[in-house]
Image (cartoon, rainbow, N blue to C red):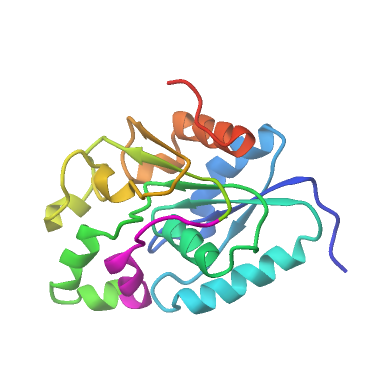
């Protein structure tokens, strides 16, 4: 028997090589604003998008009735958008992607080309390589990109400025999205940024980002 939930649930998807705990700060901010956050763990290297999709659908089904939003950081945002392209009726809420390479990742393509790179990316490489062509799902999707170039990703080459150290702003601009915002944050720092949290909350509530 599933427990009753509040009307505003947010499932948080972490990025490559991370676990759900990486989203704990953002989850706390969301909870303080009246949302009911749920972190979602998935194996970013070992398992592919098909298994992640199956597990996410099961997780949403366990929540019961009410609105469900998705917030994904980096690969997690790309995973969320890809799953909803395949299953457009899965949620009735909104989506926020933080530093997600929705157009594909130059850093991942560069990593794939060095010894051991394939093993480090595993089942996530194909998704990171190709990205999406556009967003045409029924949900409103907003993207927050970082512009502080602190990170190891750009050392691999191919990441155009401006970027957050791993993902370029250009890679986050997907045709069809509802809103886009660039903030002063590095890639990993997006999940700890007060400004990213504020903008995420604004989009989940109103379908658009707030004033800068």
The answer to whether 63 appears left or right of 200 in the picture is right
Task: Tell me which residue sits at (44%, 34%) in the image.
Answer: 193
Closest to the observer, 119 or 98: 98
Horizontal and vertical percent position of residue 167: 27, 49
Q: What is the number of callouts on the image?
A: 0
Does 127 lie within the magenta span?
yes
Horizontal and vertical percent position of residue 118: 24, 77
Picture layout, residue 171 above or below residue 53 = above
Horizontal and vertical percent position of residue 150: 23, 41
Which quadrant: the N terminus?
Answer: bottom right
The answer to whether 84 appears left or right of 165 in the picture is right
Q: Tell me which segment is drawn in magenta.
A: 122-137
Which quadrant: the C terminus?
Answer: top left
Horizontal and vertical percent position of residue 46: 42, 78
Task: Tell me which residue sits at (80%, 60%) in the image.
Answer: 64
The answer to whether 32 appears left or right of 7 in the picture is left
Picture layout, residue 84 above or below residue 196 = below
- Which quarter of the figure has residue 120? bottom left
Does 139 lie within the magenta span?
no
Task: Tell me which residue sits at (55%, 46%) in the image.
Answer: 140
Q: Residue furthest top?
A: 211
Task: Tell me which residue sits at (84%, 65%) in the image.
Answer: 2
Picture layout, residue 188 above or below residue 197 = below
Closest to the observer, 145 or 111: 145
- Which quarter of the figure has residue 87? bottom right
């Amino acid at each position: 028997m599933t427990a009753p939930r509040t009307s505003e649930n947010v499932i948080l998807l972490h990025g490559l090589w991370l676990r759900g705990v990486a989203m704990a700060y953002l989850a706390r901010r969301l909870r303080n604003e009246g949302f009911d956050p749920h972190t979602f763990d998935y194996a970013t290297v070992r398992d592919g998008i098909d298994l992640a999709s199956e597990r996410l659908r099961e997780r949403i089904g366990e929540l019961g009735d009410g609105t469900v939003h998705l917030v994904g950081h980096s690969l997690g945002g790309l995973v969320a958008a890809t799953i909803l392209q395949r299953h457009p009726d899965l949620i009735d809420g909104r989506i926020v992607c933080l530093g997600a390479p929705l157009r594909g990742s130059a850093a991942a393509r560069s990593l794939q080309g060095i010894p051991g790179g394939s093993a480090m990316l595993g089942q996530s490489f194909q998704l990171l390589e190709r990205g999406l062509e556009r967003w045409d799902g029924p949900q409103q999707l907003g993207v927050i990109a970082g512009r502080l170039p602190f990170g190891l990703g750009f050392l691999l080459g191919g990441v155009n400025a401006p970027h957050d150290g791993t993902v370029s702003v250009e890679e986050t601009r997907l045709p069809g999205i509802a809103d886009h915002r660039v903030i002063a944050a590095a890639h990993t720092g997006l999940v700890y940024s007060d400004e990213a949290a504020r903008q995420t909350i604004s989009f989940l509530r109103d379908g658009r980002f707030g004033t800068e």
